[in-house]
Amino acid sequence: MFQALRAATIAVAKHEDFRIVHLSIQRTHVHLLVEAAHKTALARGMKAFQISAAKRMNAALKWEVRRRGQVFADRYHAEVIRSPRQARRALAYVLNNWRKHREDRGERARTWLVDPFSSGCSFPGWKQLEHATFMWRVPDTYDAMIVWLPKTWLLQTGWRRHGLIDCREVPSKHQLGRPAPRARA
């Protein structure tokens, strides 16, 4: 599923008015942080992503009988980010969502500080990288998620007004409207 969703991000990367800048794949859902020029661009981009992802996921599952029905049970939930604080919370929520779902406690995940099923490996705003010369070291066999660099001030630098993101932060259920949660040791 990782490869199918990764391919879907590449397929929609041609849309310049819709950009996936971060994502996180969970067992039952996907979190995306996108920039869109307007509502129509958002709707078109999300539809293109969902169609591309659904086709690739169905192909990966190699159904013996042709599958019918929706892959994505419902539409997306759009949250317009208007402030640096809200941008920081959204970034922390998406990139650390695996901690909320306790996916960080799995056997393979224990060796990772950031979610390997997210764009976190390419995110330069981790507190743990504040004085580092290089980004995270990942295995040679790892295929990073393909995402756009953010173009908006809020997602480029504005969010930094409220501090770098600790890779151990555990997002709360309603993080976008509450203070940043404590880090887990």
Image (tube, rainbow, N blue to C red):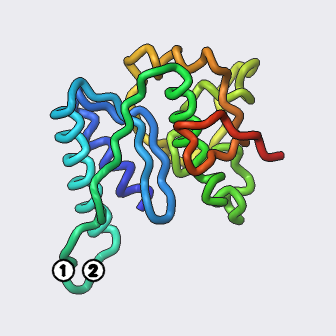
Quarter the N terminus occupies? bottom left
Mark number, residue 63: 2
Q: Residue tagged by mark 1? A: 66
Please rate how many residues cluster around mark 2, counting C-alpha atoms within 10 Å: few if below 14, some from 14 to 19, many from 20.
few
In this rendering, is residue 150 above or below 10?
above
Residue type beneath disc 2: Trp
Q: Are marks 1 and 2 in contact (CB under 8 Å)?
A: yes
Can residue 55 be seen in this snapshot? yes
Image point 83% across, 46% down: which residue? 185
Horizontal side of residue 64 vs 20, given as left or right = left
Give residue 151's position: percent from left, percent from top: 38, 18
Percent x, y for residue 34?
A: 36, 34
The image quadrant that residue 89 belongs to is top right
| 4 relative to 120 in the view: left or right | left
- Is disc 1 surrounded by few (<14), some (14 to 19) or many (20+) residues within 10 Å? few
Q: Where residue 69 sits: x, y (%)?
A: 20, 73
Q: Position of residue 78 (x, y in %)?
A: 34, 41
Compare residues 177 and 9 and report the one nearer the observer: 177
